[in-house]
Image (cartoon, coloured by chain):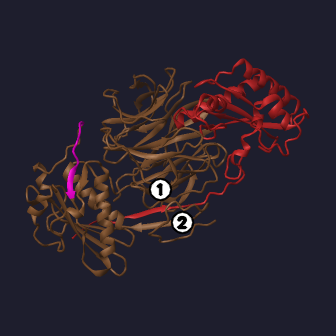
Amino acid sequence: MTPTLALNNQSPRNDPREGNVMTFIRSLCIALAFTGVAATTVSAQSGPLRITITDGVIEPLPFAAPVFVAENSGAAEVAQRITQVVAADLSGTGLFREIPSSAFISPVTNFDAPVAYADWKAINAQALITGAVSAGSDGRVNVKFRLYDVFSGAPLGDGMQFGGGQGDWRRIAHKVADQIYGRITGEGPYFDTRVVYVAESGPKDARLKRLAIMDYDGANVQYLTDSSTIVLAPRFSPGGDRILYTSFETGFPRIKMMDLASVSSKALADLQGNMTFAPRFSPDGGTVVFSVSQDGNTDLYSMNLSSGQTTRLTNAPSIETAPSFSPDGSQIVFESDRSGNQQLYVMSAGGGDATRISFGEGRYGTPVWSPRGDMVAFTKQNAGRFHIGVMRTDGSEERLLTASFLDEGPTWAPNGRVIMFTRESAGAGGAAQLYSVDISGRNLRAVPMEGGASDPAWSPLLP
Amino acid sequence: MNKLTSLLLVASAVALAACSNPDRYGANGGAGGAGGAGGINQGGLGDPSDPNSIAYFNQTIGDRVQFAVNESTLSPQAQMTLTQQATWLGSHPNYTAIIEGHADEQGTREYNIALGDRRANAVKGYLVAQGVAANRLQTVSYGKERPLAVCSDEQCYSQNRRAVTVLGAAGGV
């Protein structure tokens, strides 16, 4: 079974073929700003069109996104699709509500024509998104868009243009939506991202697991391994080019690292210890922190990837696992049962004394430091229920975001506003699914996917 | 026009060959390897009434012990089973064993891997104390990845919090 190369831009979703071998290469060129001035953030930041994400009920902001204008005959279909993805990204946040096109008073048939603000105001569209799409015979797609603050009667930021090759239309749509989301909320982008996860199939006592990667919204699923052995908990490198995961390929759990460009995996190193698992990259990508089990005891170690040098970080008879670096790389949050049950601790990245940060009822595990640095997401088990929660890095302001039979394993969107996790249903027919939730606890939703899935890890923002 | 960036995004698929692999739970193993008292196929394991057979070890002695929630302590009943396992292993020096630790689903994935390792090593330590050479015994944990019973009640959870002594031929493990 050798890898074959397929410039496959419409990859089959959840291809059931075992051992399916595919290489998937895309490049996306993005060109910015066609109004002259460099388009970064917005001049009208202080204007009325603004959502501030805080606690409390938010009435979704109504927006209109008329189908982007097709600038040539070959672009009609892709223009339609791109518009749908942009609208779905925004609506999917729970912060925006799309006004159906049946309510529109005036059509948008010319991207450069003056905006009929009164017609959009009349249907209470607070934001108007217009766009134009051209498609080359080679499949290249160019997309222009503008965002308007209808009630101010003015554009919100400059128009922008994105270009990409065949099959890049989804990424282009996500880039457009990221711009709109950022201009209106002031938050960082996260739609143009991918998620690596474990695809699951088969009965509960003989579950087949394989690594897979998809767009954050469940599109473009690609399998990275077959199901011949158990694989667990993939983690992205900070550059998004490698993943760490745990494989039972040798019969024992061992950490492997996959290079996504060459599709090759190798054992992390010839580590001492019977089992190695729970790996995670440091923010600079140069170090991996992980658990080693030896003689029934599990401790944390780190490894410098260039030198291969391994450092023992904890030395206790208790279980120490699920380590995660702070974004500045100086600290590690992890779980330990040294107190008698699972709790969260923070220590220096070099090891040494650890400070307990979780003190509520129940058990706390799988802590993950927010990319913003201000919070830790975790799994909490209490009174027969599982929760995804967040707390400040000193343990204060604990807040549970979800509750179910089994929620676990949070991963942060790169903007630190949204968390994805695994939710497993109970019983003999129980299955795992991926869910996402805003850190306010709103907008809980299943990621649209076919088949079971667990252990998501969100990529950094794609370039 | 300002060319911001170009990207080579690669997501790929590779087929991993399962080579010489003690993992009974690989794609070809399925649940059939779950072993012992679960009433699975005993083909090739001999007659459970034959004291020299693997089936005798698995069923008559019992190849597994169970644990309390979050515990790796061996109950008196578990110690009785393991004492008989040690005796059998003492009189059958051609066998080695991999001791598999498992956890129920009521725990996080990584913790359960570590907990299963504790359980497997509790069994190994007991067998070694009873005179079984340590180099005949390996341990592995499957965490909560391979439940024996699939319901979400204590009657299943108790069966899943287990350590199973899986016999293999010496040198063949």
Amino acid type at circle 2 is Met
Instruction: Provide residue A304's location: percent of width, then percent of height.
Output: 48, 44
Instruction: Provide residue B41's location: percent of width, then percent of height.
Output: 79, 44
Instruction: Provide residue A96's location: percent of width, then percent of height.
Output: 24, 51
Residue in the foreground of this view, choosing between B99 and A328? B99
Q: Chain of mark 2?
A: A
Which of the marked residues, 2 or 1, is nearer the chain's N terminus?
2
Q: Chain of mark 1?
A: A
Residue A273 can be seen in this image: no
Quarter of the image where the N terminus of chain A is located: bottom right
Tell me where the magenta segment starts and ends, as one range.
Answer: A55-63
The reply to whether label 2 and label 1 mark residues of one chain is yes
Residue A22's label in the rendered image is 2
SS category of the residue bearing label 1: strand
Is A59 in the magenta? yes
Instruction: Provide residue A454's location: percent of width, then percent of height.
Output: 50, 46
Q: CA distance from mark 2 to mark 1?
A: 12 Å
Residue A213's label in the rendered image is 1
Question: Which chain is red in the rendering?
Answer: B
Above or below — where is A260 with respect to B163?
below
Amino acid type at circle 1 is Ile
Main SS class of the magenta portion in the image: loop
Question: Which chain is brown in the rendering?
Answer: A
